[in-house]
């Protein structure tokens, strides 16, 4: 069983690995069979900006789950958060790898994004396990909608990025469903609106910086 000390160590390890180490996926990166990606300069720049935003989202996911695992006293729920974090680690690795392929860089503000998301996750955990799970549900639903919009905006010829985003979208929907099944409470409407507004600011800045 994971102890409190183990959880603190896991949280610190997550921060260091997310921000400073090359991520490694446990699953093979999604691809589209027999489809080669060939992009113009402008399309490549657009894909790079969109995948940078997606990478920031995965940096934040690592922070959120690490904080919520740290904040809960329920060992079963702690394992739920840590397992979800490992699954999101695939997304972190896939988006970082795609950034490298596109010749794009990660956001220069990743430490700031991580710190902010960790603080929100810790705050959510202090409100109780069911509201913490509700925070997961709302976050994953917003991310799912965000990824759907990226599928609409990514260049049609960028099969590599589109395959990654499509798989991420499916995974986020599953994470939201798992949190619902674990007993999540719906967050109040003002909180959901505040989360959407904060996400809009983050994605707008990360698109460029």
Image (cartoon, grey):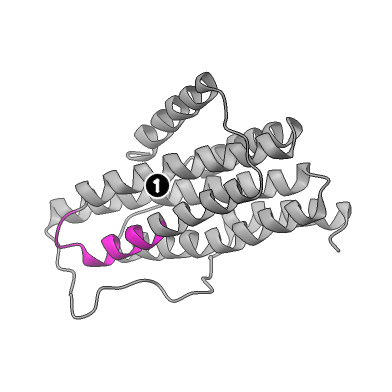
**Residue 40 sits in quarter:** bottom left
* Residue at 33 percent of width and 40 percent of height: 207
Image position of 139 (left or right of 122): left
- Residue located beneath label 1 in the image: 144
Q: Give the mark count.
A: 1
In magenta stretch: residue 164: yes
* Residue at 27 percent of width and 67 percent of height: 160
Q: Which residues are magenta?
A: 155-168
Position above or below: 205 against 151:
above
| Element type at mark 1 | helix
Image position of 154 (left or right of 171): left
Q: In which quadrant of the rendered image does the N terminus lie? A: bottom right
Which is nearer the eye, 162 or 37?
162
**Residue 95 screen position, x and y as percent:** 40, 59
**Residue 124 screen position, x and y as percent:** 67, 33
**Residue 123 sits in quarter:** top right
**Residue 141 screen position, x and y as percent:** 45, 42
**Residue 208 screen position, x and y as percent:** 32, 38
Image position of 196 (left or right of 158): right
Which is nearer the eye, 74 or 41?
74
């Amino acid at each position: 069983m994971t102890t409190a000390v183990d959880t603190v160590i896991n949280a610190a390890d997550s921060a260091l690995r997310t921000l400073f180490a090359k991520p490694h996926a446990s699953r093979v990166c999604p691809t589209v069979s027999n489809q080669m990606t060939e992009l113009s300069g402008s399309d490549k720049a657009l894909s790079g900006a969109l995948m940078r935003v997606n990478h920031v989202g995965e940096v934040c996911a690592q922070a959120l789950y690490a904080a919520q695992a740290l904040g809960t006293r329920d060992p079963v729920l702690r394992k739920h958060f840590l397992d979800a974090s490992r699954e999101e680690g695939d997304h972190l690795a896939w988006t970082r790898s795609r950034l490298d392929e596109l010749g794009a860089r990660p956001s220069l503000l990743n430490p700031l994004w991580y710190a902010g998301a960790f603080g929100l996750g810790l705050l959510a955990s202090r409100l109780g396990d069911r509201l913490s799970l509700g925070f997961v549900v709302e976050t994953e639903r917003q991310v799912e909608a965000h990824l759907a919009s990226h599928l609409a905006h990514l260049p049609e010829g960028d099969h590599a990025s589109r395959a990654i985003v499509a798989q991420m979208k499916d995974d986020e929907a599953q994470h939201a469903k798992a949190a619902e099944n674990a007993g999540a409470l719906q967050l109040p409407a003002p909180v959901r609106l505040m989360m959407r507004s904060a996400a809009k600011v983050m994605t707008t800045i990360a698109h460029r910086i």
